[in-house]
Image (cartoon, rainbow, N blue to C red):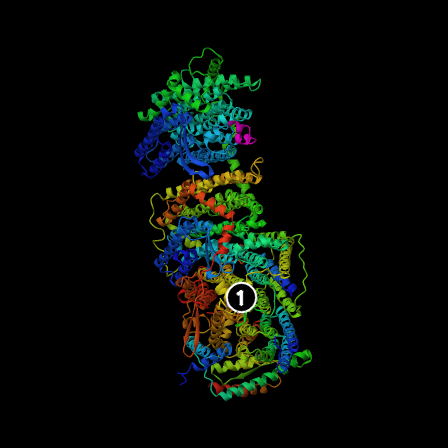
Amino acid sequence: MRKFFFWFPMSAFLLLIWMLLANALTIGQFVLGSILSLGLVLASQRLRPLHGHPKKTLTILKLICLVIVDIAYSNWVVGILILKGKSAHRTPGFINIPLDIRDPHGLAILSCIITYTPGTVWSGLTEDDFILRLHVLNLKEESDWIHTIKNRYEANLIEIFE
Amino acid sequence: MNLILTWACYFAICCFSLATFCAFIRLVKGSTPQDRVLGLDTMYINGMLLIIVLGMLYRTSWYFDIALLISLLGFVSSSALSKFLLRGEVIEP
Amino acid sequence: MEIIYSLAIGVLAGSGIWLLLRPRTFQVIMGLTLVSYAVNLFIFGMGRLSVGSPPIIESGTIADVSNYADPVPQALVLTAIVIGFATTALYLVVLLALRGLSNTDHVDGTEFNS
Amino acid sequence: MNDIPAWIAIPAAVFLVTGGLITLIGSIGLLRFEDFKSRIHAPTLGNTFGAIFTLLASILVSFHLADRVFFHEILIVVFLFLTSPVTAMLLMRSYILRLERIGK
Amino acid sequence: MMGWLDHLPILPVAVPMMAGALMLLLKDSRRKALTGLAFLSVTIQFAVAVTLLFMTAGDISSDWNNDIGVYLLGNWIAPFGIVFVVDKLSAVMLVLTIVLGICALIYSTAFWDRVGIHFHPLFQFILMGLNGAFLTGDLFNLFVFFEIFLAASYGLLLHGSGSRRVSSGLHYITVNLIGASLLLISISLIYGVTGTLNMADLGIKAGMLDAENRKLFETACAILGIAFLVKAAAWPLNFWLPNAYAAACAPVATLFAIMTKVGIYALVRMGSLLLPTGAPAAFGGDWMYAIGLGTLLFGTLGILAEKNTGRLVGYSIILSSGTLLTALGMPGVTLTGPSLFYLISSVLTTGAFFMLVELIKRTESFGSNVLSVSFEAFGLDEDKTTDYSGDVVGVAIPAALAFLGLSFFTCAILIACMPPFSGFVAKFALLSSALELTDNKLSGPSLSAWLLVIAMLASGLATVIALGKSGVRLFWNAETLQTPKLSIREAIPVSVLLLSCIALSIFAGPVMDFLAETASSLDDPNQYINAVITQASNKTMVGGH
Amino acid sequence: MPLVLIVVLPFLGSILAAILPHNARNQESWLAGIIALVCAGMVIYAAPAVFNGEVLVQTISWLPSMGVNMTFRMDGFAWLFSLLVTIMGALVVLYARYYMDPADPVPRFFSFFLAFMGSMLGVVLSGNVIQLVIFWELTSLSSFMLIAYWHHRQDARRGARMALTITAAGGFCLLAGMLMIGHIVGSYELNEILASGNLIRNHPWYIPILVLIALGGLTKSAQFPFHFWLPNAMAAPTPVSAYLHSATMVKAGVFILARFWPVLASTDQWFWIIGGAGMCSLLIGAFAATFQQDMKGVLAYSTISHLGLTTLLLGLNSELALIAAIFHMINHATFKASLFMATGIVDHETGTRDMGVLSGLRKAMPITATLAIVASAAMAGVPLLNGFLSKEMFFSETLFVNQTSYAGYWLPSLAVLASSFSVAYSLRFIIQVFFGKPATDLPRKPHDPPHWMLFPSAVLVLLCILIGVFPELIIGSTLKLAATSILGDHLPAYSLAIWHGFNLPLVMSILALVGGVSLLYVLKPLFRSYPGQTPILYRFDGRKSFDAVMNGIDSIAYILLEWFSSKRLQPQVLWIVVITVVVGMLPLLGGNWLHLKEPFSFDPAFALLWTVGGACAIGAAYLAKYNRFRALVLSGGAGLVTCITFAWLSAPDLALTQLVVETVTVVLILLGLRWLPRRVIEESQITPLRSFIRRFRDLAIAICSGLGLSALVYIMLTRDKPEGLSAFFLEKALPEGGGNNVVNVILVDFRGFDTYGEISVLGIVAITVYALLRRFRPPQESIHALENRHEIQTIDGNGLTNEHSLPKGILLAPNVLGRLMLPVITLISLYFLLRGHNLPGGGFVGGLIFATGIILQYMLSGIHWVETRSRVRPQYWISVGLLIAGGSSMLAWWVGQPFLSAISWDIYLPVIGKLHLSSVILFDIGVYALVVGATTFMLVALAHQSLRFYRKAPVAESETKAGTGTQLNFSDRVN
Ligand code: NA
Ligand code: NA
């Protein structure tokens, strides 16, 4: 099933984009969008040999909510840090986090979450043992960050992608 | 009501222009080439937001398309620049 | 707005022309880029400036000509942008070829003393 | 131009002002932080809530204009989410390598 | 509905474009198909051009207004759509281009089309650009065609690579890119002032401008004039030319012989159309005359001072540009016919000369060893796919050296405008007409006429001296002189071009009459303007939006 | 009998002669001889009519609108000359048959010989002065080729060039003169010109015309001060000298003076110019001839002298003198040609012409000697020979000139002096060569040549004697005929007799003879001490002066060229910019332009934006030399601001296009940046002051042009818009163009041809770039920078290999994301393509978006990975794009519409509904395909250079011989 429906997630994503962009919600646009989406997925197959297979829609939604909340919080924190300027006690630094997730799409989404969230930047990944090097703008408690990454994000992502 | 929105738009435009200006200062001051690229990247995002606001100001939807395109492709030039900084060339064998 | 626009063109063109007068190929290609920005804005300006009135006609309405920006200069600028892009690419490759063949990045292919 | 109802105009205005300010703060951070490793965090504000607020305002307005599927602005956030890490990761990595090279 | 003859004006552009596009589908190794396609294309173009020429002359009946064909592209009437206009001048230029093109193409098949890749498509594209530039009746479209043939000319100039080509190409490209910017600025300024881009419409609109707009319009025209003068290689905007043309390989340089004339054509065309409204200074004569005289003297200096034969031909192109500008800058229309005659003659001559110069260079080195020389000079790397062996230089034709000598002699005579060939006819016609050009009967010819006479005679003498010297050096000097091998494919085009010059001198009467008619129609641009403006669109709509 | 045949036949013969085989000496001679004789026959055939007083005219229409037709006109004078040219031609051909070596390339000789004969006949028979100029120049050209016949000899080359330069210059003067005459008379026909003598003489242009025609004639006839080319032309084979330099070509000069005598003569100016030049030539030639060592040198200078005599006669403004001149032309032709032939024979038989070496040949070559002695005697003016008669006429003419009181004395005296020298050199010529002790050290053993080689000379000598003894009988009527055709029917009384009684001319002749003998005696020591050197005159060596002048012209031209041009790019750009600024501003001067208009909106944000944009531009300009990367980033900033400006000012299409182009351009330049040298700040060799001045100048120019453009834009922006095209487009776009987006409708429909052209440019540039990069050589220092790069790479691993589908480490996540974006980007590109007709977008933007997606894959995954997995053939995309765009444009033909007309069909499908198909969409798809192809083609080709670099690097390292590259064979992939 998985192998046979490899095209589905991406095609659905593309069709969604198409329908969002189209000026009108018509059957014609839907058909056109479907054809294009499917065609593109098939055409780009050789350049995308790995397919992501997200499952567990609920987990996905949960993760999205978590991320939005975290981003909102980080926005606040970082904004305050900027406004305080030099008076703020910042302790920027790197932390190394060994990752368990191996699915490339999972890793990619993790990198997106981390980097898109203000205050953290994905700064490196070791080649063989997948140790994530993370730069944090305000590093207070290293274990908090490890906890956030491992439990809030990585666990959910493993659930979704593996 | 239009007026409120219009003034909010003006305000936002000014914010984004100032933000662009800040990014430009970083671009010029740099210190490292990475800073400059970051400045340029920020300019792209700020420009995109500015264009969205222009769309609201003039009540047309096609500004959205430009913004969409910046959000989709704005990263290409800055990541090309970063790749150049990282590897010394943009496209490797 | 007109003043800013005019000055912008002037600054772009001036910087570009300064670079065109420099001896290094990279300076010249940057100059060409800047000049082409200036020229594109110049062409565009020939349709006069207007905000919020792109030449996109609403379906089902009779077009009131005065409500829209002049589309002709826009079409011309599009052509100019494309041609400018093409020539920039060409120029770049020629300067690289010159660099490879003559081992210098001087526009004359040799290092002049002056 | 027909008038925009208040329930759209007022929240939209608020969103715009907030979004603008957040973005501006982010860019100011770009100036204020003292080294690149810190600076790279600052503009993320504009990428995230700066953009999200602005787009919320836009969604409201385009709902009023009703010439498109109105929440298409979500795409911009999706694209930003998917693309902005690429530059950031490469930049950070190259900066670290640069530091290491200089360190040697 | 349109008959097939009605579509002729578009073919000189559409045919090479489609041929060039098709060629890109073929690998460079499929030479036969490529050359076959190329010859098919040029043959069609030639047939079309000649037919158009006869149609403009009224020898083939058409329903054209004043024998001026107007083709509405996209079926949009002027001035809104782009129009192609075939009048006598365009037709003459078309025929000239394609004759030169055919010769260059034949020549190239002996060797040059294999030295790099994409020769044939580029060749078709340059023809497309040149033909379009002569046909279009729209100012911006003219710019586009300028860019097309310039782009192709960059490619062809660099064809074969090598540091000489690349470094002179860089200059050439830079200057032309700046020229393109000037064109854009001036054309858009013209649009900003008059609101039109159609050249015929411009002729009308320019007359209706108020004083202030008129000044702006003149500024635009001045800049436009500079851009055209850059293309026409007017001094001091022409320092790039000798090196670039000398660096280009022979068939390309041959085709380049007409490129400066596109600038001249544009000046003439615009000048003619703006005539009723009082053409601005750039097209109005005095400026053109002065610049032309400068160019003429500069070309003469170059010819005298230059030792390299290739650059010498370059200077002779400058010389001919100068002569044309000077002559066209004289008041009135008397000199236009002779100038066009001169133009035709000089294009054919310089075209032949470029090919000849390359053939002559072979006598200086090992005749059979062109290949190794080229490899060294042009930096040809080993290329596994293409085999140049054997067929590079064809069968040595008998008396190759005699052929080269005779051709050089003929070319020299033609360039120096010595009797009995077309060069002399042109010079005589120019000088004779210049002297006829009196402000009033009592005062006799103007000072400018005298200057033209003196400059032309002096330049002729200088050319005799210089080419005599070169010829003596090239042919009579050396123990090292080798009997060159040259392929019949190289000899034919040279002969064809030179024979055309001879034919031109034999049939000088009818040709001159036709050109005089051309000139008089340029003097009365209302024919052109009316034909363009009144051309109705083709109402039979089949589809529909 | 058509006159034109006389002229055309030799030219036909010339062509025929050229294609005969190399060694066909006999056939060539027969051909040339027959042609000469046939022409002579035709001339003689015309005799009855001509002697009857008719002027034969034949006109062939050629350039009627310019008043130039091929008019062949034979009057008596022309008849005489035609006969001279043809008969002499036949004799010289016969002579040449024996003179030319079998090894010589005879086709060339006879070909040009015949061409010359035709040209000369053309000159003589021209009834139109422009036609005359044409043939005149042809004689110069063919003589050039004949003089340079033995072009392996330096003297031949030099002599030929000198002759050509001088006679061509004269020819140009002649042309100018003829043009002026034509202007005055209103016709170029000789008949009308000859009838307009008074008109011309009284015209203010008379003096210029006279000078110009005199220049033509004098240069051709080698008259002072242009005489020096003739001795140098003696490098020609002797038949050429005999024909051209004695009998025909040099006579063309005096011919034309005689021809125009009725028009131009009988003025003081004529007397001084023509007579003066003749007098000088007469004296100088005679004097110089006396001192020559080379036999042909003697003859050459004597020719100058005798032609001087003729010219002087023509210049005397007396009808009798004219008749004498004509007579002397004939006489000189006979004896001089004969002497040249004799010289040639001597040269041929002994191998030398040096009179110092030659001696006593009369024993070995008795017949030759006899002929030469008689001819020399004629040259010296010995009675009973033709030279005596004309010389006596000359003496008598000098006596009758009363221009000024003392001219009556000095003219005859000088005439006698010159004649004495003439006697002296004739005598010396004979004595030194034929008398004295037979020479022993000659290169060859001399003997008389074959009889047929002597025959022409003998005929001429016979003619000398016959004319000398029976002048009236032999030549009387002919001379009268010729004179009549110039002077009209009323000839002055003259008599051709040997004995006119004991009068002053006879005394002068005797004086000259005696004087000549004594001169020879007096000057003998000089010949010994300075052989071959002419006293006094050697200081004014014509050849050296000529060379000096030529070299001077060369170097002056070179200096001026350097002065007025530049091989460097910067001055060229500077010129263009400065001229444009000046010329663009000129029309605007004085106008009151500044209409400060109420700004329609003042936007601090816009100002701030352009503060950034302007600063970016200035920064890029400032940094482009030493900080390329920074400059690139800054120009990217300027581009972004431009893009926002387009969006702001209602040009969404432009904003989109600018944005994508900007992105692609940055990637493009980055790809190139890698190959540019690391720029270290080096000390310039020039002084800082000069550099500063130049920079200041450039800065000033840049500022001026920037300000100028600003002003121009501002002027335009504040003016009212003219009624233009835009209204039409805005009104018709939707109803007739079928699109909401007017810009797009303009691009693909109203002005679709611009787009058609623009994509062609893009395609052309792409294939050019590709072709050029195939020959790309990486610069040396890029290879040395390799170590540095290895270091970076070991830290992060290498790029992708084929086994792995993803890179490890830092590039993993970007890769996944980038690949995820590929279908998204493609979809968006299609979205922009398909909706472009109605909303911002279109084929160009769409294509660039897709291309960017492809480039992104290259950037993230590397060339290998992408190309083993995809078959992108950019070149085919270009081709297909062009074909689709062209094909969709041609669809219109099918329905009888012009090219590019939009045609459309509405198709109704179930479920989906109405489907709108249009050739316009097809056109846009073509644009899309082309843009994708072209962009990818260029960027990928550029990227491939580093592939080559890596392949090269090991070679370079192991052999330390960088630069000789291996050809990268990536064409099969990208191609
Ligand atoms: Na972040
Ligand atoms: Na569009």
The residue lying toward the viewer, choosing from C58 and F492, is: C58
Q: Which residue is mark 1?
A: F731
Q: Residues within 10 Å of mark 1 (few under 14, many from 20)?
A: some
Whether E48 is drawn above or below F224: the answer is below
Question: How many numbered marks are there?
Answer: 1
* Coordinates of residue D82 in the picture (x, y in percent): 52, 78
Label 1 beta carbon within 8 A of ligand 2: no
Q: Residue furthest top?
A: F502
Residue F204 falls inside the magenta stretch: yes
The residue lying toward the viewer, choosing from E496 and A56, is: E496
* Coordinates of residue F283 in the picture (x, y in percent): 50, 23
Whether F141 is drawn above or below E229: the answer is above
Query: Would residue F959 be visible to someone looking at this image?
Result: yes
* Coordinates of residue E203 in the picture (x, y in percent): 54, 53
Helix, strand or loop for the magenta stretch, by majority: helix
User: Left or right: where does residue F323 sit relative to residue F406?
Assistant: left
Chain letter for mark 1, please: F
Whether E506 is drawn above or below F903: the answer is above
Image quadrant in which you'd find residue C29: bottom right
Q: Residue furthest right?
A: A87
Residue C59 falls inside the magenta stretch: no
User: Left or right: where does residue F183 sit relative to residue A4?
Assistant: right
Image quadrant in which you'd find residue A140: bottom right
The residue lying toward the viewer, choosing from E118 and E170, is: E118
Q: What amino acid is labelled 1 in the image?
A: Glu
The residue lying toward the viewer, choosing from F320 and B76, is: F320
Quadrant of the rendering where the N terminus of chain E is positioned: bottom left
* Coordinates of residue E461 in the picture (x, y in percent): 50, 38
Query: Where does the magenta region start and end?
Result: F197-211
